[in-house]
Image: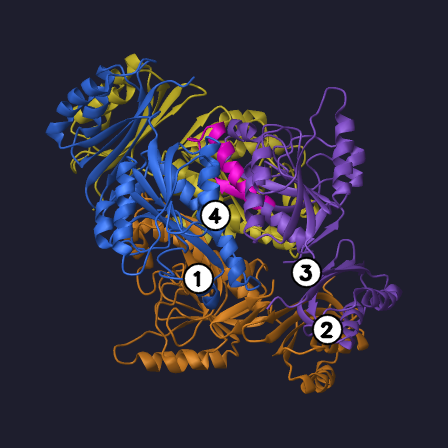
Chain colours: A purple, B yellow, C blue, D orange
Amino acid sequence: MSQTSYVLRLSCPDRVGVVATVTSHLASRGANILEAHHFLDTVSNRSVMRIVFETGGQPIDESAFSREFGAAMQPLGIEWSLRDQADKVRVVIAVSKHGHCLNSLLHRWSTDTLPINIVAVVSNHEEQRRLTEWHDLPFHHLPITPGRKEEQERRMLDLFAASRGELLVLARYMQVLTSAACRELKDQAINIHHSFLPGFKGAKPYHQAYQRGVKLIGATAHYVNEDLDEGPIIEQAVERVDHTLSPDQLTTIGNEIESVVLNRAVQWHAESRVFEFGNRTVVLR
Amino acid sequence: MSQTSYVLRLSCPDRVGVVATVTSHLASRGANILEAHHFLDTVSNRSVMRIVFETGGQPIDESAFSREFGAAMQPLGIEWSLRDQADKVRVVIAVSKHGHCLNSLLHRWSTDTLPINIVAVVSNHEEQRRLTEWHDLPFHHLPITPGRKEEQERRMLDLFAASRGELLVLARYMQVLTSAACRELKDQAINIHHSFLPGFKGAKPYHQAYQRGVKLIGATAHYVNEDLDEGPIIEQAVERVDHTLSPDQLTTIGNEIESVVLNRAVQWHAESRVFEFGNRTVVLR
Amino acid sequence: MSQTSYVLRLSCPDRVGVVATVTSHLASRGANILEAHHFLDTVSNRSVMRIVFETGGQPIDESAFSREFGAAMQPLGIEWSLRDQADKVRVVIAVSKHGHCLNSLLHRWSTDTLPINIVAVVSNHEEQRRLTEWHDLPFHHLPITPGRKEEQERRMLDLFAASRGELLVLARYMQVLTSAACRELKDQAINIHHSFLPGFKGAKPYHQAYQRGVKLIGATAHYVNEDLDEGPIIEQAVERVDHTLSPDQLTTIGNEIESVVLNRAVQWHAESRVFEFGNRTVVLR
Amino acid sequence: MSQTSYVLRLSCPDRVGVVATVTSHLASRGANILEAHHFLDTVSNRSVMRIVFETGGQPIDESAFSREFGAAMQPLGIEWSLRDQADKVRVVIAVSKHGHCLNSLLHRWSTDTLPINIVAVVSNHEEQRRLTEWHDLPFHHLPITPGRKEEQERRMLDLFAASRGELLVLARYMQVLTSAACRELKDQAINIHHSFLPGFKGAKPYHQAYQRGVKLIGATAHYVNEDLDEGPIIEQAVERVDHTLSPDQLTTIGNEIESVVLNRAVQWHAESRVFEFGNRTVVLR
């Protein structure tokens, strides 16, 4: 039933024979390919691949496999990583006062429908402690005191490291990270922006949307980078709205979209589907 | 079957008794209300209403009705307009080289599924002459020569007036109108912007969208005003896209959205459903 | 801020002067109309209206208002009901083992973004007790024992009555109600069906959808009536899916749609927006 | 610019080494893979692949390539086909009286945004002759006379063959084909059904949708098979509707969805993206 399977991610400059080299090596080790997806990005002229394989029921010797596979890939300049699908990504969630995204992530996780391993929740406020602890998860309150915001951020990053976190999910954390933190978290932090980017950057996007009279509102999940609200987009969705809705009602509808969009982005990241190309992503679904 | 019916649009400062005054007057003239929609905009504190009524089969004496109705509305400061639903809005369409929006408008019009009366097509290019004339409509070629753009614009506005146009539809006209023209066309011109505003203003939005790696692309129909791409939004829609699509393919998908969005905006305007409040619209559907 | 306001629902055979009679009466009592929506259903030739009004800050004497208003409406055969908007609909939620809809309803309720008053949760299983009691709500376990299903249903209906429930929300209750219960709950029970009706009636719709290879899956919220899965539809939504998704993954996506759709239907019902016409609904948004 | 490229479709029972065998063969011939997509259908245990490759600018010798490639694939039981991407699929369109799908297909084709080669239009009516001939395409009027429907169908199939048609697009043809014709056209005919299947099979689906009060309407493009409206689904889409829309207005909205959905299905088929598995399709996008 729960057969051992592996997901392999690869990225390399485009050249003849890349797919053949990879798949031939796997075939020679008796690996049966369950899913294979290749995409050549013609802007950067780089290929990315995601391959899911199993080996007839018995687990592979990961270190031997890696040694041999690495040797085969090296001549072609292929960067790669391997992950046992049973080894779920370790996630730390950062929240502020609002709990809709946290609640949705925890519900999906607790019903075993989101393939991640949540290890801690951190917050600059106390509001979400009760929900977190009800799920038997550690809740870390890291309040922000005037003039000591960077110190608090440092504590959060240390906690992320100490928890052996692999992905930091900013589930409406509402704090702008320093450039240093953004660099440190590169490829490891996903933010949900409560707007359909690139429209309505910055604060209070639902109020902006109301003032502008838009007919659709949306949310955007993206990797964190040094440009606020400009990181590579992983997923977006919108919902139809109209003039009868107040900014509060737009916010409620927006909250539902945010939860759905963030769940999807976290899932795709956790399933090794997302590749970054500069300011864009490729999601191999 | 094709019973005579009228659509009444009203707008006024909010006060007690507005709806009662309007509907009582109509009832006293034997008008049977088929649709009534009222909305109080709490930002501007103005009410808008749209009422569709018929009067038992026989047409009303419009000038007598207007005189009496106007007298009844005047004390409450109600602005209003009346239109026989059989009297379709006279539309002039402006296009450039691309014909997808024009083709869709003409198809809907020619199959009697868009309640407008197209009276002319104008263009700064010749590409759409053949399609226009095939539909037995006059095509006016108004080329733009260097240094004489304003003169060409003047000719277009004169043509709009001479055609007794009531609505100018910029169906990918691709020319920025002067401020003077925008003022002159206030409430009478609808533009289709090939982007989900307020993102990607300006030129080549599908290329911008590609560079930014967005996961949805869209289109926006809005009234023309002096701020380019900032007029009141009437309708918007989006479609899901992904990394596999080139800028050309995004453009093709975007073109289909543009046609659908522009058709809807034109229809709602033609059905007297759209009210402007500063930079927003209320669409009473 | 939290001004006293009222929502008035009306329904009557179409005739001249209905809107005028209603709004004139309200104006004569100093009621200021905040929202008014009228729809004439040309199939049944009945009018429905929803009017939200306030009376300058002070509450009305509801019994005096009702006596006078009733007298004014009676000659026109107008059925009506009045509700103080602060008086939230009392809701009982019925669930089975799965908690995604319950979790979403409770989250919205607890963050004050769903205008209902949840008074109890009932279930034929124990799974959702912990979540319910964490929200300080009574959880009633009404197990179904072989041959005594009708008795259990009777107990649920008695509990609904004893709780002074006004709306029973079947949030994935998974039990078919008897015809007698459906009649008793007419207009008072909303079910979420895990499919885009009228396709995929009956059990395991996501497996049916998988077998059929549909490209969109959806959910439908409807009033309960005697024909299983055939009650008047209140709201529906869909999400795009593809061949890569297993029945389990379709189920997870479907669960998210179910929560959103059920929340909307409950909200619109609670805001007195939904009118039933035979097997259809009119939702005055 | 318009580099020669090829699309290869493959299908086979799942076994170790399939992807490696294919890609190694291509690499040994100097083929550069531009896109590669593999999917293992775990229900049927068959793999499908779609590979786009080019060979450094110069065209391949197709017959030599095919001989060698076929020899390499044969031991693994791989079924395959190769197509030069410049060699567009030859399409015959069948219509009845309504022209919205035809108009949209012709517009896309004539603006070079749909990669097909339309060779003829056939119809049992005369309505679409003018539009067809305006596009300089042959229009074949094949009227249906009482008792001679099968004979007319035979003439249509003969015409399809004589035109060397590869795909018959039933763009609202409105005639039920005989089982014999469905068998003959297997995998070669796409129909647009004006409903979100599997709901509302049969005639007048928009009237059915109106009677049922659905909140979304849709359209479905599918391959033709012997079970009317039950062929493998290629694409579906929906649009939000409400109670204010008459059956005629639903039809207009539905027509727009039909055009978009049919265009997409035809495009994906023409790009060799669609694989049939029994009653389902896999669309490798």
Q: Position of residue D200 (x, y in %)?
A: 34, 61
Q: Amino acid at mark 2?
A: Ala
Single out the mark in the foreground, 3 or 1: 3
Single out the mark in the foreground, 4 or 1: 4
Relative vertical location of residue A6 with respect to residue D245 in this rendering, above or below: below
Q: Position of residue D189 (x, y in %)?
A: 47, 73
Q: Is the residue at mark 3 from the same chain as the one at mark 2?
A: yes
Q: Which residue is mark 4?
A: C100
Chain letter for the residue marked with disc 1 in the picture: D
Q: Position of residue A50 (x, y in %)?
A: 71, 62
Q: Residues within 10 Å of mark 2 (few under 14, many from 20)?
A: many
Q: Nearer the viewer, residue C2 or D267?
A: C2
What's the CA distance linking mark 2 and mark 4? 38 Å
Q: Which residue is mark 3?
A: A85
Helix, strand or loop under label 1? strand
What's the CA distance linking mark 3 and mark 1? 36 Å
What's the CA distance linking mark 4 and mark 1? 30 Å
What's the CA distance linking mark 1 and mark 2? 38 Å
Does any portion of residue D163 appear in the rendered image? yes
Q: Is the residue at mark 3 from the same chain as the one at mark 1?
A: no
**Residue lying farthest left?**
C75
Q: Which residue is mark 1?
A: D220
Helix, strand or loop under label 3? loop
Residue drawn 55% across and 64% down? C243
Q: Which residue is mark 2?
A: A31
Helix, strand or loop under label 4? helix
